[in-house]
C-alpha cells in the first residue's frame, strides 16, 4: 500500500506522529515542529488549529500531498519552500528558491530601519528617501511600506528596493502586490547602488541591506537549507565581507549627507566593518545584537 493511501483517513494526531518519526529518522533537527507545520498545511490550517483538532482526518488527495511534502522535507528542503511562504514579522511572505528565506535575525534589520525612518519623520519636515538593496523576497521593503503607508502616500517618504537578480525582484514584486503595497515601493534591478531607484540626486537618507556575509566555505558546505537557497545571495567571499566592502566603498559619495546605512552582518564581523567604514570617513559606532547576543546590525553614518 502506498504511504499516501495509508495516511488517508488517519487522524491529525496519527499523521503528526508518523511524519515526526519519518523526519527524525531522516535527521531533521526539528522533526516534531516540521511535522506539525506540514500536517497543518495539508489541512489548510495553522498549528494552533491542528493541536485543537487531533481527531481531524485528511482525504486521499490531501494525504498524497502531505506524503510528498514529508519526503521533500526528509531530504532537507526548507519548510518555507515546501509550503511556499514564511511567517515573518507578522506577515506571510511568499518564498521560493528565487530568493533567501527571511530569517528571524532580519526582523532586527527591519525594526532598525523603521526606527530610523520614524525618527527622521518626527525630527523635521524633510522628505525621507529610503532604499533597500539586495531586497530578495522583498520582505523588508514590504514591512517598511506597510508601516509608513500614510507617509508614503503623502510623499513624506520615498521607498525603493533593488536586487541584482531579476528573478528575486519578480518575487519581491509578488510580495509587494500580495500585501497591497503597489505604488508604495519603486522596484529596480541592478547591483548595489547602480540603478537610479530614487529621484535625483538618487541619494538615500536611509539605506538598508542584507548582503551576502557567509564565507565561501560556509556557503558551499551545503548545511541545512543553504543547499536549496541561491548561492549568489549567500557567498560573501573568503571572509564573508567582499560584497559589504564593495558597498562601503561607494557609500561616501552615494549616501545623502547625514545619511545612514543599516547593514545586517555575520558573527564576528562588526570590528572589520567598523574599521573599513572608518578608513572611508564613515562612522560605524552603533550595532544591535540579536537574541543570540550576536552583533547583527551595524549602523553606518555619513557625517
Image (cartoon, rainbow, N blue to C red):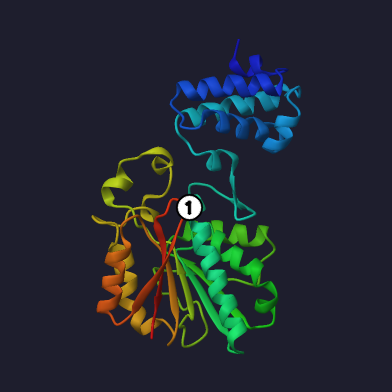
Q: Residue placed farthest to the bottom in the image? A: 125
Question: Horizontal and vertical percent for residue 45?
Answer: 72, 37
Q: Residue placed farthest to the front in the image? A: 293
Q: Horizontally, is 277 left or right of 146 in the view?
A: left
Question: Horizontal and vertical percent for residue 38?
Answer: 61, 32
* Residue at position x 48%, y 52% in the image: 291
User: Quadrant of the rendered structure where residue 284 is?
Assistant: bottom left
The correct choice, above or below, for 57 with respect to 253 in the image is above
Question: Horizontal and vertical percent for residue 75?
Answer: 45, 30
* Residue at position x 45%, y 83% in the image: 203
- The answer to whether one can see residue 49 in this image is yes
Number of other residues with Cα within 10 Å of mark 1, as a class: few under 14, some 14 to 19, many 20 or more: few
Front in this rendered view, residue 190 or 18: 18
The correct choice, above or below, for 125 with respect to 31 in the image is below
Residue position for label 1: 291
Question: Horizontal and vertical percent for residue 55?
Answer: 76, 22
Amino acid at each position: 500500500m502506498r504511504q499516501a493511501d495509508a495516511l488517508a483517513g488517519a487522524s491529525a494526531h496519527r499523521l503528526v506522529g508518523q511524519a515526526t518519526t519519518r523526519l527524525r529518522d531522516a535527521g531533521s533537527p526539528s522533526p516534531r515542529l516540521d511535522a506539525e507545520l506540514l500536517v497543518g498545511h495539508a489541512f489548510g490550517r495553522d498549528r494552533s488549529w491542528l493541536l485543537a483538532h487531533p481527531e481531524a482526518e485528511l482525504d486521499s488527495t490531501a494525504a498524497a500531498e502531505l506524503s510528498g511534502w514529508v519526503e521533500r522535507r526528509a531530504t532537507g528542503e526548507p519548510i518555507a519552500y515546501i509550503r511556499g511562504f514564511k511567517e515573518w514579522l507578522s506577515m506571510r511572505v511568499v518564498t521560493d528558491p528565487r530568493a533567501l528565506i527571511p530569517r528571524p535575525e532580519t526582523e532586527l534589520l527591519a525594526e532598525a530601519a523603521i526606527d530610523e525612518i520614524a525618527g527622521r519623520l518626527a525630527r523635521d519636515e524633510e522628505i525621507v528617501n529610503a532604499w533597500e538593496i539586495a531586497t530578495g523576497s522583498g520582505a523588508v521593503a514590504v514591512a517598511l511600506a506597510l508601516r509608513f503607508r500614510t507617509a508614503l502616500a503623502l510623499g513624506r517618504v520615498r521607498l525603493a528596493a533593488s536586487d541584482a537578480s531579476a528573478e528575486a525582484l519578480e518575487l519581491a514584486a509578488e510580495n509587494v502586490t500580495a500585501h497591497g503595497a503597489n505604488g508604495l515601493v519603486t522596484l529596480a534591478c541592478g547591483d548595489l547602488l547602480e540603478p537610479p531607484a530614487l529621484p535625483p540626486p538618487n541619494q538615500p537618507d536611509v539605506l538598508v541591506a542584507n548582503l551576502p556575509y557567509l564565507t565561501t566555505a560556509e556557503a558551499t558546505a551545503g548545511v541545512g537549507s543553504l543547499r536549496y537557497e541561491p548561492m549568489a545571495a549567500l557567498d560573501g567571499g573568503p571572509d564573508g565581507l567582499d560584497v559589504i566592502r564593495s558597498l562601503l566603498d561607494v557609500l561616501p559619495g552615494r549616501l545623502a549627507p547625514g545619511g545612514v546605512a543599516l547593514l545586517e552582518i555575520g558573527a564576528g564581523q562588526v570590528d572589520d566593518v567598523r574599521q573599513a567604514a572608518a578608513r572611508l570617513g564613515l562612522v560605524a559606532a552603533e550595532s544591535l545584537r540579536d537574541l543570540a547576543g550576536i552583533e547583527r546590525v551595524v549602523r553606518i553614518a555619513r557625517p
